[in-house]
Amino acid sequence: MTFSALEVWVLIGAIGVGTFALRFSFLGLSGDRPFPDWALRLLRYTPVAVLPGLVAPLVFAPTGPDGGADPARLIAAAVTLGVGVWSKNALGAIIAGAVAFYGLGAVLGA
Amino acid sequence: MSSTTPESAYWQGLRDAAPFVLVIAPFAVVFGVVATEAGLSLLETFGFSALVIAGASQIAALQLMIDAAPLAIIIATALAVNLRMAMYSASLAPYLRGAPLWQRAVIAYLNVDQTYALSIARYEDEPELSLPARMAYFFGTATPVLPVWLSMTVVGAVLGNQIPPGLSLDFAVPIAFLAIVAPMLKSLAHVAAALVSVVLSLALLWVPMNAGLLIAALAAMCTGALIETLMGRRAP
């Protein structure tokens, strides 16, 4: 890792303060200020807008045996997503994904 | 007048939150493991969990640190992941109006996915709940969540130092995120936002400083909101 201890703490502090500001924002106001509808509508999609984009390059990364995407990663990602959508259970999805990834890794000799 | 006393509300919150420990613990362990793999010390890892208490943004920040992205981009991306907290704050505020400012500040610090979801559901179910009972219920939900989050982070960090490097733990990050996102794909708008995010983030990988992800996320948020508007209904 290329970060100094100071940079790591700056990072943690900035994310901590910023996250607290987001959490406190409307709780801190005493007045009756309604949240604009369009803003609520945008905010509702932040997790599904940010996290898939973060994951995609990791899933499709060229780490496979032939220089392409790694089949174990692709299949494990599909299993995690499928179990998660079907069961609505994050813990079950993690376990299924981990079993698929390490199971396939063993089978494919990765 | 509600018959729920603050004391019974507190215990109710604690009981309601207890099963979520099973969800929080694995994410805390994953964060602790990945943080030590990324080179963070035990104190830095613990401080991260204690000051931020938002696993997805913490793991997102770690991934960008591993990618050696600039500090400003890492901070912006982690905060983008946490933008939803402003929505939580806006939706809790009308129910907690009138509570002392310091108590609202403590609630803000503890305002995470699980405590928020349980509390807002309770407030909507029982509108006659008194303000002290609402506060007590919220603190009840936080009581199992925070200690488990912090202690399991430490367990993960200690484990991370003992796991052999050949175990491809880097894939814990995508699996954890896919498991968080999958149950959220409950409407066409959510699915479309996720697809736009995936396609654009891959298409914008050439953009310097990992800024492509932020552009992709912004476009995905607009897509979700636009489709929701076109469908003429509000997601649950």
Image (cartoon, coloured by chain):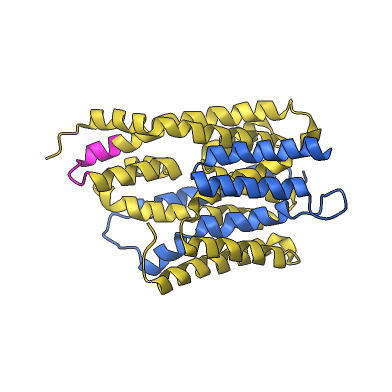
Q: In this view, does B167 lie above or below A11?
A: above
Task: State the image coordinates of residue A64 (x, y, percent, origin top left).
Answer: 83, 49
Identify the image quadrant of the C terminus of chain A: top right
Residue B54, x across and y down, in percent: 52, 44
What residue is shown at x 33% (from left), y 42% (from top)? B119
Magenta span of residues? B126-136
Q: Residue furthest bottom?
A: B230
Residue A108 is inside the magenta segment:
no
Q: In the picture, which quadrant includes the N terminus of chain A?
A: top right
Q: Is residue B38 something one can see in this rendering?
A: no
Apparent colour of chain A: blue
Query: What residue sits 43% from the left and 31% below the top?
Result: B19
Foreground of the two, A106 or B75: A106
Chain shown yellow: that is B
Residue B128 in magenta?
yes
Could you say where residue B25 lies in the image, as x and y percent from the top left? 54, 32
Q: Where is residue B165 in the image (x, y as percent from the top left)?
A: 79, 33
Image side of residue B233 versus residue B182, left or right: left
Q: Which of A78 and B168 is in front in this view?
A: A78
Q: In this view, does B190 lie to the left or right of A4?
A: left
Q: Residue at x 31, y 52 (%)?
A: B93
Asked if B34 appears above or below A51 in the picture, the reply is above
Q: Which of B195 and B111 is in front in this view?
A: B195
- The image quarter in which residue B172 lies: top right
Q: Is residue B192 visible?
A: yes
Q: Is residue B144 toward the left or the right of residue B76 in the image?
A: left
Q: Tell me which residue sits at (39%, 33%) in the image.
A: B17
Quadrant hosting residue B201: bottom right
Against B211, residue A20 (above or below) is above
